[in-house]
Amino acid sequence: MDQQGFEAEDLVRRFGGTTALDGVTLAAGRGRVLGLLGPNGAGKTTVIRILATLLRPDAGRATVAGFDVARDPARVRERIALSGQHTSVDEELTGRANLVMIGRLLDLSRRGAAARADELLDRFGLGDAADRRVAGYSGGMRRRLDLAASLVGRPEVVFLDEPSAGLDPGRRDELWRLIRGLAADGATVLLTTQYLEEADALADAITVIDGGRVIAAGAPAELKRRIGGHTIAVRLGDPADAEPAAAILAAIAGRAPDRAARGELVVPVTGDAALYETAARFREHRIGVTELALRLPSLDEVFHALTGDSRKAAR
Amino acid sequence: MTGPLRTVRHALVLARRSLAKTGRNPGPVVNGVVSPALFLVLFLYLFGRPVAGSTGDYLQYLFPGILVMGAALSGLVSTGTNINLDLKNGVTDRFRSMPISRLAPLLGSVLADFARYAFAVAALFVLGVALGFRTGGGIAAALGAAGLAVLFGFCVSWVAVLFGVLVRDAGAVLAFSFITFLPLQLGTSLAAPTGTQPGWLRAWAEVNPVTHVMDACRALLNGTPADGTVTTTLLWCAALFVVFCPLAVRAYGRAE
């Protein structure tokens, strides 16, 4: 693996009697985005905290930006930034004061810290709010400021722990755009998420963990293939169209759709071509819809599919 | 820039952060002045005549102890709870994942307290003089007394920092500060000489370091012989610092 990214091998960490990590291996090369996907309590935050030198592993080893986290934590800290689950900005200070403080702690000159703060405030769309106290910021603004604070020192590796938690979809898209910008600048990113959709949108590769173990790893497309791809969901404009619509979907998907709710049909499909086909056939038959969606499987479905797989493999 | 200097500079940046927050939310600092001021006025007019015969004489006895109270211990609350709050939200994680000494955030908080104590001492001096207090030992001795009180506060702060790091619950930190406040502050020579106290209380008051600080400040401010109380105070300061500063830094480094 490229030395400039990060690499963890067989990380084990116990807290009292519980084993939070039970041999986690993951890696990403320079400029890549690795999505660490898992439910609450899977061990995602523990992985991040070990790589960010906040926790020592009980066993296993990890290098970040070429330095061992246990032997050389000071060197690692010079090259990383961490944006935790709780936003780590000061409510009582203004947005600008927060960034200038971080800059001063990173040994920028007074002028250098101010210039870097202004640059980041502009880039993150906080220029107008720069001199307001963070206490008055919206959730999305805080997240953006938090991310900006992580970038003051131009880190080589950025750790983002559930960056979009608690954001509404519009704000989330904006944040995603900014996170993609990090990777484009050459930073290696490790982000944790509970949403396959988020990992799919941002990551070059995904590692799925559950109960402190890696249960799957690979490129998003590859994982989706293993999970069974997408589902098409249709909500009909007129419930009277249910029979012909179901017939069309059955022909495309090769199996009869589920009728999850009144007027809604859901069927698993293998690729996005099925969506275009569905739309074309509906138009041909003049079937009106209020919703026509190509959905990724939910995290529950992902885990069901993956843990099912691993159990089969074990047998 | 070399290690220790760099750490001090980072601590100053963080002390400024703490003071900026105090500027926005001055409650604890106002409390640090108002509580001792209330003790001063109440004790003065409640006990002045029965204890010392006149409020004027009693003020000369009482005021130095109040100064120590204001400078040193009333601000304990703010350091312990501030550190505790930082640990709860993500700020501490950010600091600890940055290339700065783990001492810097703690030192910054304590340095900010230093400024807050100095403010409390100045405000209390104004009140004391307004009530009629006269320093008998000259300006140098008065500054020495103020400095001693603030130094003691700085050293005691590390105890609060340790508890702020170790105890997870901010309410518990506050309760700890309050419960220790009463016997530490009042079980001393603050209101009356230890010689007038019953044996059990006297025994406590005489081992209580706060008594020595108050006695030292009283001697300096009144120009009376200090009888080694200044030395005892400095030894206590050194002991508190040497024991609790490393413990606090270690606990902070380990807090997860």
Image (cartoon, coloured by chain):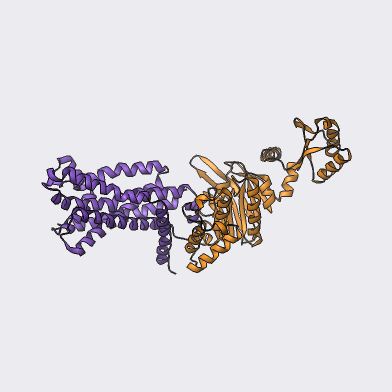
Chain colours: A orange, B purple
Q: Nearer the viewer, residue A306 or A17?
A: A306
Q: Position of residue A162 (x, y in %)?
A: 59, 48
The image shows residue B84, relative to residue B148, as above or below, that is above
**Residue B136 shown left or right of residue B79 in the figure:** left
Residue at left offset 18%, top offset 54%:
B132
Q: Position of residue A26 (x, y in %)?
A: 62, 52
Q: Position of residue A6 (x, y in %)?
A: 60, 57
Residue A153 seen anywhere in this rendered image of the structure: no
**Viewport quadrant of the C terminus of chain A:** top right
Residue A255 seen anywhere in this rendered image of the structure: yes
Residue B235 position by quadrant: bottom left
Q: Give the residue furthest to the right.
A: A284
Q: Nearer the viewer, residue B184 or B127?
A: B127
**Residue B249 shown left or right of residue A153 in the figure:** left
**Viewport quadrant of the N terminus of chain A:** bottom right
Q: Nearer the viewer, residue A10 or A73?
A: A73
The number of callouts visible is: 0
The image shows residue B167, relative to residue A100, as above or below, that is above
Residue at left offset 40%, top offset 65%:
B4
**Residue B104 shown left or right of residue A36 in the figure:** left
Residue at left offset 84%, top offset 37%:
A287
Q: Give the residue furthest to the front.
A: B130
Q: Position of residue A235 (x, y in %)?
A: 77, 36
Q: Give the residue furthest to the left.
A: B53
